[in-house]
Image (spheres, rainbow, N blue to C red):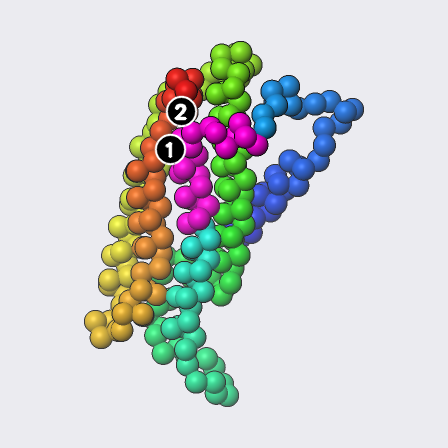
Amino acid sequence: MALGLLTLWFAGAAALSLVPARNGQKKPDGQWPVTKEDVKATPVTRRVRRLRLYAWLGLATAVAEGLASMPFFDAPRRVGAFVSPWPELERAWLVDLPSGVLAGFAVLVAIMIGLIAESVHKDAARIVRYGQSYLATKKQVPGGNSWVPTALIAALAVGAVVKAVVAMPGNAPLAVWLAGGRDALVLLALLAITVRTRQSAKDMVAELVHE
């Protein structure tokens, strides 16, 4: 239910963003045009790089979900109830959804984050080109960068690792171990990206103003 509501929210936000403004009014950013060359010449800040890496991680999660489900369903077809050769995988995963649901949601999130990343990069190009005159039209950006989301991701990653280790049998082949560690690997990658690309909005603006 939570994934379904988030999917509807993302889809609705994407649809509304495509609706043109009423009465022919221009969006505020339309007064500050930038070319493709401006955007290309703008430095890629850590904040933009983080969003792009999140998008790629979303696509990688979709692939990982498909690969991880293969050992679970790798059983001879027969009449009657399905019995997985590795039922421990269901206990090793933090999220056990019907096959394909997690992959579809991950792809949708990846697309949305990718669009947001390009929007932030375009906004960065406006800062580089127009400087303080453009920043004067924006709200003051916060200077802090909370560690709470990072700590939450770290806690989930540790929980996923522990759950996979406890659930998986010692005689499982490497492919099954990798499948059981699907959620742990994704969360560890998410944690690494978040830690390596930390940058507050204020720091990003300061870097761009310097450019």
Q: Position of residue 28 (x, y in %)?
A: 63, 20
Of residues 149 and 127, the one nearer the viewer is 127
The residue under label 2 is 204
Q: In this view, does 6 lie to the left or right of 96?
A: right
Tag 1: amino acid: Arg
Residue 145, image quadrant? top left
Residue 143 appears anywhere in the view: yes
Farthest residue to the left: give it.
Answer: 170
Q: Look at the picture and state if 208 lies above or below 113.
A: above
Q: Are marks 1 and 2 in contact (CB under 8 Å)?
A: yes
Q: Residue at x 26, y 50 (%)?
A: 158
Q: Where is residue 162 in the image (x, y as percent from the top left)?
A: 25, 57
Q: Residue at x 35, y 46 (%)?
A: 190
Q: Is mark 2 on a helix, strand or loop?
A: helix
Tag 2: amino acid: Met
The residue under label 1 is 46
Q: Residue at x 41, y 57 (%)?
A: 95
Quarter of the rendering occupied by the C terminus = top left
Q: Position of residue 32 (x, y in %)?
A: 60, 20
- Over which residues does the magenta segment extend? 36-57
Residue 2 appears anywhere in the view: no
Of residues 75 and 120, the one nearer the viewer is 120
Q: Where is residue 210 in the image (x, y as percent from the top left)?
A: 39, 17
- Inspect the magenta stretch and tell me whether residue 39 lies in it: yes
Residue 137, image quadrant? top right
Q: Look at the picture and state if 32 lies above or below 8.
A: above
Q: What element carries label 1?
A: helix
Of residues 189 and 10, the one nearer the viewer is 189
Number of residues whose C-alpha sits closer than 10 Å to that of mark 1, classed few (under 14), some (14–19) or many (20 or more): some
For the residues marked 1 and 2, what is the alpha-carbon distance in whole angstroms?
Answer: 8 Å
Which numbered disc, 1 or 2, marks the residue that appears first in the sequence? 1
